[in-house]
Image: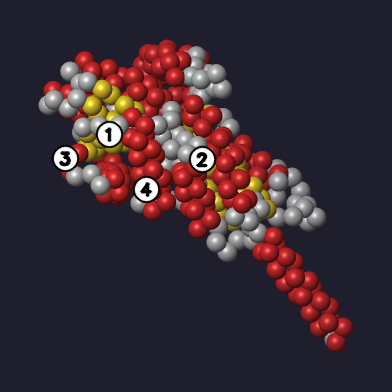
Amino acid sequence: MSFRKEPAHRHDQPEQTAVLLVNLGTPAAPTPKAVRAYLKEFLSDPRVVEIPRALWWLILHGLILPLRSSKSAAKYAAIWSKEGSPLQVHTEKQTNLLRGYLGERGHRLRVAYAMRYGSPSLPDVLEQLQQENCTRILVLPLYPQYSGTTTASVYDAVFAHYARQRNVPELRLVRHYHDDAAYIDALKQSVLAYWQTYGRPDKLLMSFHGVPKRTLELGDPYHCECHKTARLLAIQLGLRPEQYAVSFQSRFGKAEWLQPYAAPTLQTLAREGVKRVDVVCPGFAADCLETLEEIGLEARQAFLTAGGGEFHLIPCLNENAAGVHALADIAERHITGWPTTIADRQEREREAEYSLARARELGARR
């Protein structure tokens, strides 16, 4: 194995601790060319598509990319904001707020974000953190529920980056936070605040991103963690079982995915006489194509066309203060023991000075 050339280690540069948020990613622009590049990277990940590589290469380049790029670009264009991609805009704002909240708690550390696919890329951000002498890095994927298709893919990318590095930092990785009390409470506050403004629905649908059913059969805990999140949120909201439902969205390909599917569920609710349905997407830390377009536009149309009356999409946590404070709680818990406060650094400096003085004293005696 050949190692990459790295900048020389600077002994005069203070060591830093970093918290790195990682989200899925987004195209650079709502254009067929940009979307094609993004989809190529995303769908080439063996964690995302578990099909023999040679066969999948032919399908991806012969069918998927030529046919889906323009269609997906049109969908991105429908939700693109003046600031850019909603996912990137929200993730950047979450990062800035998290830096501030951790600072208010006395932590002096670097807080950054990266995308698993697209820009800023995970390797580029890890490289930048190395340039800043971040010798302790907490990787916090913005996926509340663990899945091999998402969280494990982030792990893969982190380990692949450092597999060719000599100077590897101390790493800690957050696996999930699907049942974290602060996260559940943030979801609760978000839903109740929406209902206080717009009234309550006949039914609350909690929609999670789907994955192939075979992942569950092979041992992926994602399905169970989604249902635990939904159950805990329902308890906090005081909902009876008949007042809410769980569904999975974003099905891709012809294989069976986790069910029930979101759009058919909404159509069934409409036919059963549900006049108003609210949809919340607890598995997404920030609004994106899957929430704003797939649920906010496509699923809305499916419900209304089937006879439903009112359709409401409750925003993701985004820059919600309780949501970012939940991330701060999670980060703070995982950096325990690392020197991140001024007091920590002063204690370390005192220990270093004492050790140096002791070594000199022993040397003088000899």
**Does 365 appear above or below 271?**
below
Residue 245 lies, in percent from the top left, at: 22, 37
**Which of label 3 and label 1 is nearer to you?**
1
**Which of label 4 and label 1 is nearer to you?**
1
Element carrying mark 4: helix
Element carrying mark 2: strand
Q: Amino acid at mark 3?
A: Glu
Residue 348 lies, in percent from the top left, at: 70, 67
| Left or right of residue 366: residue 68 | left
Q: Amino acid at mark 1?
A: Arg
Residue at the spot 25% in from the left edge and 29% down from the top edge: 277
Residue at the spot 37% in from the left edge and 19% down from the top edge: 64
The disc, 4 or 3, on the residue closer to the chain's N-terminal end is 4
Q: Which mark is residue 57?
A: none
Q: Report, in whole angstroms, how far the alpha carbon at label 2 lies from the one at label 3.
A: 35 Å
**Which of label 4 and label 2 is nearer to you?**
4
Q: Is residue 168 visible?
A: no
Residue 261 lies, in percent from the top left, at: 23, 30
Which residue carries the number 2 mark? 22
Q: How is the image coloured?
A: secondary structure
Which residue carries the number 4 mark? 184
Which residue carries the number 3 mark? 242
Element carrying mark 3: helix
Q: Amino acid at mark 2?
A: Val
Q: Report, in whole angstroms, how far the alpha carbon at label 4 lies from the one at label 3.
A: 20 Å
Q: Amino acid at mark 4?
A: Ile
Residue placed most toward the observer, 42 or 234? 234
Which residue carries the number 1 mark? 200
**Residue count near mark 3 (Cα–Cα under 10 Å), binned few <14, some 14–19, many ≥20:** few
